[in-house]
């Protein structure tokens, strides 16, 4: 049974579908790399330093820093200086746009609506 989602494809103040796509594409691209997605999933558990992310992910410090840069650039993670290191946190507000868009797209098909919605 198809249920409605409380998600709108048209964020307030943003124009056409083409304009929204232009705004969201860079964030989706930044999240599209498996290593970056791995880091985002680790940060979803809580804030971590680069060292903690290195230990948890198995990636080198250089690779972790390399992948954190575009995530910061697109506002998906934030950093807070702490002593001699930086602590990274997930920026849930920045993830809301892409997540809402993907949920809306999924809900446009009966299969997606069934997967996204619970009675």
Image: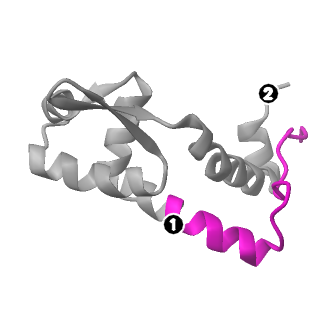
Residue 114 in percent (x, y) is at 78, 40
The one of 100 and 23 positioned closer to us in this rendering:
23
Residue designated by label 1 = 26
| Count of numbered circles in the view | 2
Look at the numbered discs 2 and 1 and tell me whether their residues touch, using CB distance below 8 Å.
no
Helix, strand or loop for disc 1: helix
Residue 46 in percent (x, y) is at 39, 22
Residue 6 falls within the magenta-colored stretch? yes
Q: Residue at x 77, y 52 (%)?
A: 104
Q: Is residue 8 above or below residue 15?
A: above
Q: Closer to us: mark 2 or mark 1?
A: 1
- The answer to whether 26 appears left or right of 70 in the picture is right
Residue 40 in percent (x, y) is at 39, 39
Q: Quadrant of the C terminus?
A: top right
Q: Residue at x 14, y 31 (%)?
A: 51
Residue farthest along the bottom direction in this orientation: 18
Q: Earlier in the sequence, mark 2 or mark 1?
A: 1
Q: Which residues are magenta?
A: 1-27
- The answer to whether 65 appears left or right of 99 in the picture is left
Residue designated by label 2 = 118
Residue 93 in percent (x, y) is at 61, 39
Q: Quadrant of the N terminus?
A: top right
Residue 23 falls within the magenta-colored stretch? yes
């Amino acid at each position: 049974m198809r249920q409605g989602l409380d998600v709108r494809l048209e964020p307030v103040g943003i124009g056409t579908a083409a304009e929204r796509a232009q705004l969201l594409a860079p964030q989706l691209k930044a999240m599209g790399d498996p290593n970056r997605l791995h880091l985002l999933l680790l940060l979803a558990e809580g804030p971590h330093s680069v060292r903690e992310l290195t230990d948890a992910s198995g990636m080198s410090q250089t690779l972790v820093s390399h992948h954190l840069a575009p995530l910061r650039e697109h506002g998906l993670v934030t950093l807070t200086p702490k002593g001699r290191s930086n602590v990274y946190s997930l920026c849930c507000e920045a993830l809301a746009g892409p997540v809402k868009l993907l949920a809306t797209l999924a809900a446009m098909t009966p299969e997606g609506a069934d997967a996204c919605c619970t009675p």
